[in-house]
Amino acid sequence: MVAIAFIEKILKLDAENKQYSIVVIGEESHVAYNRVGLTSFFEHRKVEELYLNPREWYDSHPDVLHHKLNTKVISIDPTSKSITTSAGYDVSYDLLVLATGSDAVVPTSTPGHDSKGVFVYRNIDDLERLITFSATVPGSAGCVVGGGLLGLEAAKAMMDLEQFGSVKLIDKNPWVLSRQLDQDAGKLVVDKVTELGLDVLSCRKIKTINVDEEGNTKSVTFEDGNTLETTCICFAIGIKPRDELAASAGIKTAGRGGFIINKDVETSVPGIYAIGECASWENQTFGLIAPGVEMADVLSFNLCKSTQHGHSEAPKAFRRPDLSTKLKLLGVNVASFGDFFADRDGPKELPGRDSLIEAAERGPMIKALSYKDPFEAVYKKYIFTADGKYLLGGMIIGDTKDYIKLVGMVKSKKALEMPPSQLILGAKADGEDDNPDDLDDDTQICSCHNVTKGDISRVVKDGSCKSLGEVKVCTKAGTGCAGCMPLVQSIFNAEMKAMGAEVSNHLCPHFAYSRVDLFNIISIKQLKTLPEVMRECGRDPESLGCEVCKPTLGSIFASLFNEHVMDKNMHMLQETNDKFLANIQRNGTFSVVPRVPGGEITADKLIAIGTVAKKFNLYCKITGGQRIDMFGARKQDLVDIWSELVKAGMESGHAYAKSLRTIKSCVGTTWCRFGVGDSVGMAIRLEERYKSVRSPHKLKGGISGCIRECAEAQNKDFGLIATETGYNIFVGGNGGSKPRHSELLIKDCPVEQVIPILDRYLMFYIRTADRLQRTARWMENLPGGIGYLKQVILEDKLGICADLEKQMQELVASYFCEWTEVVNDEDRRKQFQQFANTGESSDPIEIITEREQSRPAYWPKDSVKYDFKNHRWSSLAWQPILEASHFAAADNSSTPVTAAVKRGDTQLAIFKVKGKYYATQQMCPHKRAFVLSDGIIGESIDDGTEEGKKKKDMWVSCPYHKRNFTLEGQTPGGCSSDSELSIATFEVEERDDGWVYLKLPPVAELDSLLGTERWKVKKEETGDPFAEMDRKSCNTKGRKSVKPALFTNGVKAEVKTKSIDW
């Protein structure tokens, strides 16, 4: 973690000068990962979720960053300035930075320390070995030796495995965390973790580890003669710096280990530096990330900015690091800050001018003030100077809300403006927000990466970061232990508000309400159309809305009233996916996904899917949700495809909707010998219940039949894991771009209570989540988090559980298959055609054959930057294009009606909105996609002023990537999302002969600029992304195994095969 922090800082500081080329050599097989979050690996088992930067990041700096994995450096030659690797090659250097970290200490003098079942807790390989071994000894006792930070983390990890019958923590000290806490605080932590199921054995030292005849651990014997049966021991008794390279390089090391460094973090050999746990400063090594990051900060600044290396600024120096820590261990908040043992060891320094000697001559130098609440399990001890004017340090158990503020007070060395008693009793109440205004700019907010309040404020004020995610990327705040995130959020919100850009939860400019507010208003007043909602609570009662509020309102209507999304009042509110009940793909075709509840499917239905795919030449792929996705369906073929699927007994899979997608399951007790619950049966029942339920975002579930978790239920919006007495229910997880592990809502839930609890949870989410907010983000923003959710869902704190169950029951009782309704309705069937004026079709992307299936060519990298809106045609003439009856539904309604039409080889889009016609090219120039007629029509609000009326715009939003093109306003055809893009617009009118006319240039001229063939995406435009890879691997792409008998003299023989008679 320290090494990657140094690399990131160098890349940032050296971005202009490009003075350095960086070569990184790592012994492990993984790129840099978050060791602070190692325990979470036991939950998700995915090392990629721990990566501090994805693997692609390392390849995104090809000119300056080169990395080698699985490579160990075995020696350093300072004379030739080169290193030798285990692979046998040398690498030369100008400057060398050692960030070799540390190893876990193993008591090699203890008999049996190398027996089977003995582990350490240090890296991913250690954890994977422990996971594998634990599955071989289920129900036995597991032990952790060491009561420090790492020991408690290891104990939690072993408990989370749920393989051991019990977990024991063995500590030689009278209380845990003896390096951070005093006796009162340490014993309070012991009491708390014991309540959570961890057995703590204090004042115990292991004399021998006893083994059986095969070398397996069977028990331990303590120095007092007592024995304890155990099959697994994990040592977490300390670390030793990795300084073995010192010998070859002649680098001086400390008596306790570690490369000795000076204030510049340089070792005794010029040009060789050391940072992190391998470095010894003033005979101290540091096992925390913060001091290592501080070393990285000093070195990167000096290399890139200081006079030491030819620059203009004064060099930085490494000083006494801040060892303050704030962690949550086994559910217990623990913090220590500043000089937290000043009352025991004497103060390291005193604020003001007095020296320690002068202060000691006058009497006691410090006084401690303690507070203990055994009922709330809170303990605080703050240490002050004897006069009570300065805070020196302290420790906290339980209520750690004031931690950041206290650390800032210690570092500032400023006199207190309050009596000490007020400081220790003045913590804010539960639920009260952190107030960043109380903090100075130099207050450290993120101790893991040494990020101050000023650092966060600066990137918000200068416009570099406009979202919390961007702040995390830019400053690294919150990317270590993440304990600072609530305060980072508060600082971000405060700065945005100060700039007049308050973080508003209003849905869009058309409403002064959030999605939650609108849900409640619509529910209470039973509003069922966009005009009704606009008149009731919109800023402009006559507005059409926009691409943000329309789909949101459509989703709310569906969640409350469940009308068909293709009904007149609903259809134009929908995104393209919902509008045509299928996911639109790159080439304007759609995907078809029948529902396969729980992943269980009959042979007849598989044959039906295969028949349809073969008949319509659809590309097939198995999805991660255990169903079959068929791609490449033309809009005009969707009804015929679904007619056959419905006839075969299949239903819509709602892959296009913000609703329940799938509930993944393992086979459970249906087939598996390890299963303890019928996961398939439960998955099918739940998927049949919640199918089609619209929600703020998509929903995914998972059901595992045992703790082996084959269905990955713990990274779903809701997931169940079978136990001997019911199911553990997990909520609020998701994969995707921001993965989040779910949290346990209830343990051993009886089978008959699963549906009532999920009904409450899902309906509470539907009622209270923001627009497009997954359950994971909703949980993160829910005041009180999982604790509050348990109170609402399990304890009925708000008295709404019965109402939530009733509302969900009404919703699921109104179910109908949307595609079955379309297949059986002639008017709805007519809406599925490519062009309104002809039965012809056009393919805007070249179709290629790959691995015996058809797919569209890759999208081009560049957009079309031509100025279509200002193109000058040689001549224009009125041409009849389409009968006006097509737009009849828009005559007396604010609901727009659109059409795609074909003229020659050119595709055009026509819109009728509020009685007025508009016409444009059909192609969005961003990705050359012919889809604008399917976009949502938006309109700016009318604020009632003359100036506002002049500025009022109407636009169409491309359904692919939300590029908004103006239909009416100051610059028709312009793109408000990207000034380099534009579209051609045309005059259009309806005439008395019942036809709609467009004023167009001659067909040949029109086609030469806008024709489909002119802009058709060709295979040769983008090339093959795997060309180099296939060349290096001798072109083995997609190679299939072939029986040897099919070859004659090395040449494949032609073989006739029988196939199913489709």
Image (spheres, rainbow, N blue to C red):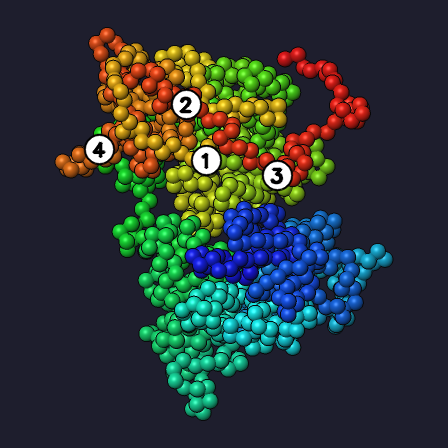
User: In percent of the image, x 33 and y 65: which residue is there?
Assistant: 438
Estimate how packed mark 4 is, as few (under 14), some (14 to 19) or many (20 or more) residues with alpha carbons within 10 Å: few
Q: What label sits on residue 970 in the rendered view?
A: 4
Drawn side of residue 411 relative to residue 150, left or right: left
- Along the polypeptide, which appears first: circle 3 or circle 1? 1
- When the figure is inspected, residue 994 is found, relative to residue 9, above or below; the finding is above
Q: Amino acid at mark 2?
A: Arg
Left or right: 302 in relation to 160: left
Q: At 62% from the left edge and 57% from the top edge, which residue is drawn?
A: 25
Tell me: residue 313, above or below residue 996: below
Res 994 quadrant in image: top left
- Identify the disc placed on residue 413: none
Find the distance from the CA under tag 3 to the CA under tag 2.
32 Å
Check disc 1 and report the residue beneath it.
861
Give the labeled residue for mark 2: 1014
Using the image, determine if residue 125 lies above or below residue 362.
Answer: above
